[in-house]
Amino acid sequence: MPAPLLAARAHRIQPFHVMALLARARELEAAGRGIVHMEIGEPDFPTAEPVVAAGQRALADGHTGYLPAAGLPALREAIARHYADRYGLDVDPQRILVTPGASGALVVALALAADPGRNVLLPDPGYPCNRNFVELVDALPRAVAVGPDDDYQLTPALAETAMDETTAALVVGSPGNPTGTLATAESLQGLAALAAHHRATLIVDEIYHGLQYGREPAQALAHAPEAIVVNSFSKYFGMTGWRLGWMVVPEAWATPAEKLLQNLFISASAPAQYAALACFGEAAQEIFEARREAFRQRRDFLLPALRALGFRIPGEPAGAFYLYADVSGLTDDSFAFAGDLLERSGVAATPGLDFERTAPQRHLRFAYTTSLPQLEQGVERLAAHLASG
């Protein structure tokens, strides 16, 4: 009997190649090897105690049912106050929708913006799931090469060259994954104007906001008020496994966005939403800021240490918790290099294949989501690995 036909999009959507490397790292650990993990973009800190306590209270109080598709009203209002307190912005809570992780927000954003067959501009390198989310809605991902000269950010000049009459949306990440770089206010303004001219949608991924070391990242809503802005409770707020994010949409799009959320997800987790209310309290904020300082210290150690070993990292990545290194002076195949580094020296890093089409063989991403002593050990192992040939 012939097998049922698999939809074509299932073939187009690519896996995280790093997951095979992570699985191998776990096998080595199970066999007794010590592995320094610099491959996974997940904070190593547990969820802050005030947030856990709020989640436990929610469970004890029976908050385990469905919530409104757009989110717990109190949480939407708390997020609006966050924009006012942190950025001085007045955002109507009705424009804020709570989602199952930032991934849920990105899927809804692209479903709102991109009809089948239209193209979506994506910086290359960039977050790999964005390509797959575009494929999921049967739109066409269009990679736009960005590099050190652009601080690895999509600029208005690059976007204008890549756009045509079928462009539906432009996606920007700031701070960016895998590069940790920030979009400027001027760039966001220019991209917003370009999107408006072409009747396209600017989607700005801000899930690493809060994790910056030095200058504050430009807030998209201040410079591109009609953009869709996506954020998350996973990174700065440390709630990865709770799967909670949010999106801010133009006023006219709030009802269509809520309709999509109703049909796709019903609602985000109720206990997670009640727990997230504690993220905006003073006790939790003190914890988050202490953790941000720990990430800054890790970056300030790892950046010069990698450069001293021959990894080329332009500029000073100012946010997130990644360093995107050019390894072309050390190898002509970053994927093979990453596998060899793991097998021989017990250091796990992510090859560029997951992030870009332009020059994946030239790059590795190092995540400083492990402790400073572990990073120091990782650098020692890297030095020994390179010395051994």
Image: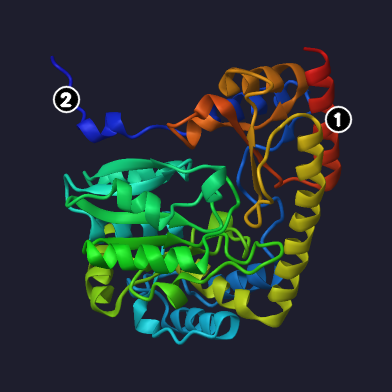
Horizontal and vertical percent position of residue 130: 39, 47
Amino acid type of the residue tagged 1 in the rendering: Glu
* Mark 2 burial class by Cα count in 10 Å: few <14, some 14-19, many 20+: few
Outermost residue on the top side: it is 389
Horizontal and vertical percent position of residue 310: 75, 29
Front residue of 92/98: it is: 92
Q: Residue at x 28, y 28 (%)?
A: 11
* Mark 1 burial class by Cα count in 10 Å: few <14, some 14-19, many 20+: few
- Residue 250 is left or right of residue 375, and the answer is left
Front residue of 209/164: it is: 164
- Residue 121 is left or right of residue 178, and the answer is left
Amino acid type of the residue tagged 2 in the rendering: Pro
Picture quadrant where residue 98 is located: bottom left
Picture quadrant where residue 30 is located: top right
Give the Cα distance between marks 1 and 2. Answer: 52 Å
- Residue 113 is left or right of residue 248, and the answer is left
Between discs 1 and 2, the one toward the N terminus: 2
| Secondary structure at numbered mark 1 | helix
Horizontal and vertical percent position of residue 132: 35, 41
Instruction: Identify the coloring.
Output: rainbow
Instruction: Please give the residue where the numbered disc 1 appears in the rendered image.
Output: 380
Q: Residue at x 23, y 52 (%)?
A: 167
Residue 57: give its label: none
Query: For the N terminus, which image quadrant?
Result: top left
Mark 1 touching mark 2, by CB under 8 A?
Answer: no
Does residue 382 sit above or below 162 in this rendering?
above
Instruction: Please give the residue where the numbered disc 2 appears in the rendered image.
Output: 4
